[in-house]
Amino acid sequence: MNEVNRPPRVGGWTRFVTARPRLSLLVALVITALAVLAGSGVADRLGSGGWEDPDAESTYATKALEREFPASQPNLLLLVDAGDASVDDPAVAAEAQRLVSRLTGEKGVVGVGSYWQADPSAAPALRAEDGHEALIAARITGEEKQMGETLDRIAPKFRGAHGPVEVSVGGPVAVRHEMQTTIQEDLLRAEVIALPVTLVLLVMVFGSAVAALLPLGIGIVAILGTNAVLRGLTEFTDVSVFAMNLTTALGLGLAVDYALFIVRRFREELTGGAEPLAAVGTTLRTAGRTVLFSALTVAVSLAAMLLFPQYFLRSFAYAGIAVVLLAAAAALILLPAALVLLGHRVNALDLRKLLRRGRAKESDGAAAATEGKGWARTANLVMRRAPFFALGTTAVLVLLGLPFLGVKFGTADDRQLPSSAESHVVQQHIRDGFPGSPGGGLEVLAEGRATQAQYAEYKQRIGALPEVLRVDGPLVKGESAYFTVLPKGEAVDDPAQGLVGDLRATEAPFDTKVTGAAAVLVDSKDAIAERLPLAAAFIAIVTLLLVFLLTGSVLIPIQAVVLNALSLTAMFGAVVWVFQDGHLSGLLGFTSPGSIETTLPVLMFCVAFGLSMDYGVFLLSRIKEEYDTTGDHEEAVRHGLQRTGGLITAAAVILAVVMVAIGTSRVTNTKMLGLGIALAVLMDAMIVRSLLVPAVMRLTGRATWWAPGPLRRLHDRFGLSESDGAPEQAEAEERDKVAVPG
């Protein structure tokens, strides 16, 4: 119906958000300015760890050892390089002793020890096998921010040449601090790359510079608001610095998605002859509802990470939920106000018209008729050959995911950093040149009164375990003691993880707790495995419910969950093939640790699944709208793909650009997250939404829309869709339902 021929019909929400558009935008500007102030310095308050289970045995043992035996848990290592001389040279030893004395006098540093002071049993682990390098170890105390400040103060004093030796700074605290600094620098560079490229792509999509600026504005509001939320959360809980990358990516990506959908529908209504206020009303009743459902589905996927104990994952849930809801709120509150003020000027600076200057002007009607013809032809082809496309695309996606069957899980370490990073260089020297597995040993905390004979008997018992290279200790303090157990192989390989179980199963006359890199990994894997079924069930059940409320179908929600999960196979296969196995490591500039950090697949699944549902909701809502209007299933699928195919692809490309910008990070986990999600959204938009979904819906036919009577009535009462039926028609249908028996 042509809205020009009757007064504009606007709902309560439209009246609310458009009653005082200038005031709304002014209030938003003030709130955004306050968010900038509230979120300032947020990066300095974020942590760079959080991969461990806080309730695990290894976490308890680590904290107890830090408290009772600070020297047993060094987090600062000074690599002393004597050049061509030996570390036993008197001049080298004298300079090393001076360094130890200076480090001991530094505030916030405890437990200083070195090769030159160590007892004979521990000395070999602190001296390189070639005799030219040795270690000074210490512990920096305090919270993570305080440790970083201490490191910044003392590192310049010790780094560099000191007489006959050259000193490099490393250890866990240096790795974490360098990782945090690198992430902040990389994030700024990613924003500098992503913003102008996104603007150019938006101008190409809209053809209008004014329309293109709207999604960027929404994205900036969402990002700044989320930074303020994260800053507030740091007062109550730990938040990972990695979450800032997700804030930027989702803030821009989802703002673009939602604004694209709303602005596109608004411009369609203007083209159809509606006045701006009526166009906004129709847009909010249709595209606005879809955006709301989309935001809820993405938020549900991200909320599943709250079920895991690691604060690394929980941080992404905090950041993700905040940015999704803020992006949706900005799109549904600020964007309508801006559109009412702009009206037809939303098409100002239309570059397409400038390019067509001198040629015959294409009429709006002809443009509408030809829009999406390529996608309509694609839909026709896919539905004519539905079995071929359904089986073919499924086979390709499964094939691309096969490398994930060989996944090996590990821990995040210095190899996350670029090979030139100082702390990485130090750890690599230790790995390559020092005996045993320095930094990869297991510590056994013994609590309870015991005699020297009992300690000796226990030491002999664990020393006889198959994978044990050497047992050092015990170091006794009161009723606590600890042993250091060096495994024969790598720090976190399968034999080392097996050794954790053997140590925990070994009987002792006192309570024992095992920690160390392999123990932390074992506990983290167990925590994820325990919570994973619950998280998967949560995502699946809530997603099924939301998609049912959108479509009223039983089959479509099941299709959506299954096909969305299938769309992620390429991402998981690529993650293993590239980042675990090391293919393309030279091209992409990273060092492969030979494993995938345990929490990354969970994080990537939740983010990518949510984004896939985002695109799925956009497509399904338009198909449902057409089906409600015509009752023609195949025409509804064709029309839905024709009207949203280009939009979804454009949104996916823009989001992929943002994720690739994030993927330029020098930190491997961030690079993996950015490039992996970019691949997932492109595969979903270009393969699943374009080929697999229409093929499957053609095969299921009209049964696609079936639901039993009770569920139909539930949807009639509580469901929402993008259909824009007139109130008079809806009221007539309700009267018919009452009048017809049964």
Image: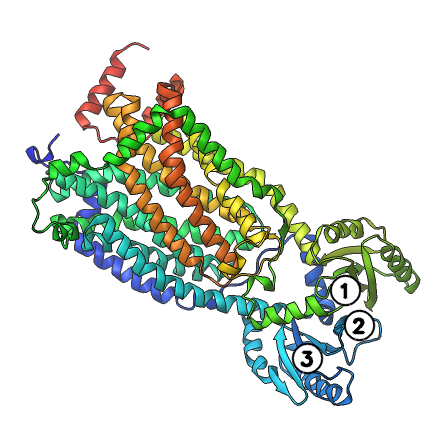
Q: Earlier in the sequence, mark 3 or mark 1?
A: 3
Is residue 190 left or right of 65 when viewed as pictured?
left
Residue 155 vs 447, above or below: the answer is below
- Quarter of the image for residue 686 reads top left
Q: Is residue 708 left or right of residue 153?
A: left
How far apart are the alpha carbons under marks 2 and 1? 9 Å
Residue at numbered disc 2: 124
Residue occupying image coordinates x 27% and y 11%: 740
User: Crowding near pointer 3: few (<14 within 10 Å), some, many (20+)?
Assistant: many
Q: Position of residue 313 (x, y in %)?
A: 53, 52
Where residue 364 appears, as percent x and y from the top left, is: 11, 39
What amino acid type is highlighted by mark number 2? Pro
Q: Residues within 10 Å of mark 2 (few under 14, many from 20)?
A: some
The Cα–Cα distance between marks 3 and 2, rounded to whole angstroms, is 15 Å
For label 1, the SS is: loop
Label 3 with label 2: CB-CB less than 8 Å: no
Q: Is residue 447 visible?
A: yes
- Gap in Å between the C-alphas at discs 3 and 1? 19 Å
Three-letter amino acid code at disc 1?
Gly
Residue 509 appears in the figure = no
Q: Image quadrant for the C terminus?
A: top left
In the orientation shown, which residue stands out farthest toward the top? 741
Do the CB atoms of the residues marked 2 and 1 lie less than 8 Å apart?
Answer: yes
User: Residue at label 1?
Assistant: 436
- Residue at (50%, 43%) from the top-left corner? 304
From the viewer's perspective, tell me whether residue 108 is left or right of residue 436: left
Amino acid type at circle 3 is: Val
Instruction: Establish if 730 lies above or below 41.
Output: above
Report which residue position mark 3 lands on. 80
Tell me which numbered mark, 3 or 2, is placed earlier along the sequence. 3
- Element under disc 3: strand
Lower position in the chain sequence, tag 2 or tag 1: 2
